[in-house]
Image: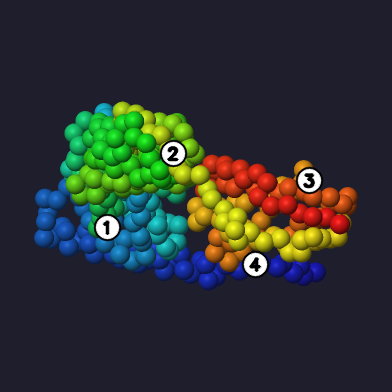
Amino acid sequence: MRHLVSIQSNKPLFLGGVIFLSLLIIISTSVLFILAVKKPKLSSETATQVVRNAFAKLISQELEASLEKEFLPADGKSTVVLSASLNTGGPAEAKEMLPSLEVEVLEGDLTLLKKEEKELFTLYTFQAGTKPGRAKLEIKAGLLKKTLSLALFDPTPPSPPTIEAPQNESVLGNTRPSVAGSAQAHSTITLFIDAFENGRAETDDKGLFSVTPETPLKNGPHLIRLVAENRYGIKSLPSESIKITIDTQALEVDLDNLRLEPNPVSRGEMVNLFVPASLETSELFVILSNTQYELKNRYQSSVFSGRIIAPKTPGNYPLTLLAYDKAKNTTFFSNVATLNVT
């Protein structure tokens, strides 16, 4: 009786491995023969490295390396990690013949602390010294090389900014007064008003700056101070505080051109109200019979308008206006008009 046996064939894979190993033997033998003839005194370690470099050319390979940071404080303790890998193509057997990774500090105050071998990459941890400057690292894998650099910066904080305007104890009629002064060149200036951040600016080549509050200030006293931050994120101590007082003029409405249409009006009916106001007015409300209505500056012409509802009880009703500027300073206008409800 015959037994049929099914055998799965791996001929393509087997033949590929045979061809690859044959090429490896031929190249290794050829290189070693040439070395033996031309350089008979060459050490076995050097000869092996030469064979590996020659063999590495047979397969595709790419050296990748990167630093987790572009700059590091030269404080004698901060660290940076370099990740390096040699990506290859070809059979698994080929990877065992590739040259190992090597990392060298070419310049700069950096010291290698540790090396960690991972499955797909290698991590190198370096510690900064105390000398600011440029550090340069070279990563090698046989014939492949890659150079990386980073800045070792002075960790000393920048000097506090100096406020030159406005003067201390100034009284200002502007709700967004600019603050000018000097600090370290190319630094970021943060403006604090009453302990809250309220604007940022950059210093120029000479260290000069001018920063304007993002949020308008209410009438009354305010404390101003500044903090400088260099490009590496190191912040200065706060500047000396100055005190300013905001005292803006009260908002105005044009009562001569205020219009109520219709007036008189039947109870419960809609009434159109038009109120011209000063340019600094940002919000305007009308109060009628304990009910507040918002008027809109619809065309950005400082003429606020809206609709209000006449009370359901006949009589004469006074209107009161409540105006706000951009800093939320408030102005009341009592009995600006009378609505006659029939």
Q: Distance between the residues labelled 4 and 2?
A: 93 Å
Q: Considering only order in the chain, which callout, 4 or 3, is on the residue closer to the N terminus?
A: 4
Q: How crowded is mark 3: few (under 14 residues within 10 Å), some or many (20 or more)?
A: few
**Disc 1 to disc 3, how far (Cα)?**
86 Å
Q: Give residue 321's position: percent from left, percent from top.
A: 65, 48
3D distance between C-alphas at marks 2 and 3: 32 Å
Q: Which of marks 4 and 2 is nearer the N terminus?
A: 4
151 displayed left or right of 303: left
- Which of the 4 quarters of the picture holds residue 233? top left
Quadrant containing the N terminus is: bottom right
Which element is circle 2 on? loop
Look at the numbered discs 1 and 3 and tell me whether their residues touch, using CB distance below 8 Å: no
Kindly report the distance in space between the C-alpha atoms of the residues bearing marks 2 and 1. Answer: 70 Å
Assign a secondary structure to mark 3.
loop
Q: Is label 1 in a helix, a strand or a loop?
A: strand
Q: Nearer the viewer, mark 2 or mark 1?
A: 2
* Residue type highlighted by circle 1: Leu
Say whether disc 4 or disc 1 marks the residue closer to the N-terminus: 4
- Residue 289 is tagged as 3
Which of pointers 2 and 3 lies earlier in the amino acid sequence? 2
Say which label, 1 or 3, has the lower sequence index. 1
Q: Which residue is drawn at 11% across and 60% down?
A: 38
Label 2 with label 1: CB-CB less than 8 Å: no
Q: Horizontal placement of 218 versus 272: left or right?
A: left
Residue identifier under label 2: 247
Residue that mark 1 sits on:
144
The picture places residue 59, in percent across and down from the top left corner, at 36, 65
Q: Residue at x 22, y 59 (%)?
A: 32
Q: 175 or 63: which is nearer to us?
A: 175
